[in-house]
Image: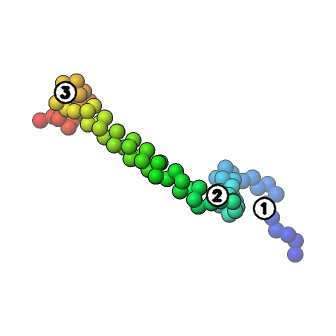
């Protein structure tokens, strides 16, 4: 039996090429670093992320304080449909 292959005028589209590239990358084995190296900076990274989120909330609380005239005017002008009575 002759060997089967794609049609002679077959040209794969970008989606097919990307799918095959991802499939090849997922099945390719890569050496991994030791487990201790992965966990070395984990507490520091967690602390940085938690600190950034906390700082964001503190800044937002001050910036969007609606008892200030500028913020209240901005919100009423841009979100009039919420404050219409």
Decide which of tag 1 and tag 3 comes sooner along the chain.
1
Task: Residue under label 1, please give it.
Answer: 6
Which is in the foreground here, disc 1 or disc 3?
A: 3
Determine the CA span between mark 2 and mark 3: 53 Å
Q: Does the CB distance between marks 2 and 1 fall below 8 Å?
A: no
Read off the residue under disc 2.
33
- Quadrant including the C terminus: top left
Whether residue 76 is visible: no
Direction bottom: furthest residue: 1
Question: Badge 2: how crowded within 10 Å, few (<14), some, or many (20+)?
Answer: few
Residue at image point 80% right, 64% down? 5
Is 15 left or right of 62, judged from the image as shown? right
**From the viewer's perspective, is 20 left or right of 43?**
right
Image x and y of residue 4, in percent: 82, 68
Q: Residues within 10 Å of mark 3 (few under 14, many from 20)?
A: few
Identify the residue position indicated by label 3 in the image: 68
From the viewer's side, name the closer residue of 8 and 52: 52
Location of residue 83 (image quadrant): top left
- The answer to which of marks 2 and 1 sits earlier in the sequence is 1
Name which residue lies at 67% across and 49% down: 14
User: Element at badge 2?
Assistant: loop
Quadrant in which the N terminus appears: bottom right
- Its colouring scheme is rainbow
Going from N to C along the chain, the mark reached first, 2 or 3, is: 2
- Where is residue 56? Give x, y as percent: 34, 39
Q: Return the x and y of residue 63 as percentages of the image width and height.
A: 27, 31
């Amino acid at each position: 039996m002759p060997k089967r292959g794609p049609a002679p005028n077959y040209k794969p589209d970008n989606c097919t090429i990307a799918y095959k590239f991802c499939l090849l990358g997922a099945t390719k084995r890569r050496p991994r670093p030791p487990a201790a190296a992965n966990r070395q900076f984990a507490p520091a990274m967690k602390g940085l992320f938690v600190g950034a989120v906390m700082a964001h909330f503190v800044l937002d609380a001050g910036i969007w304080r609606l008892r200030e005239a500028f913020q209240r005017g901005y919100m009423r002008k841009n979100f009039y449909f919420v404050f219409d009575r």
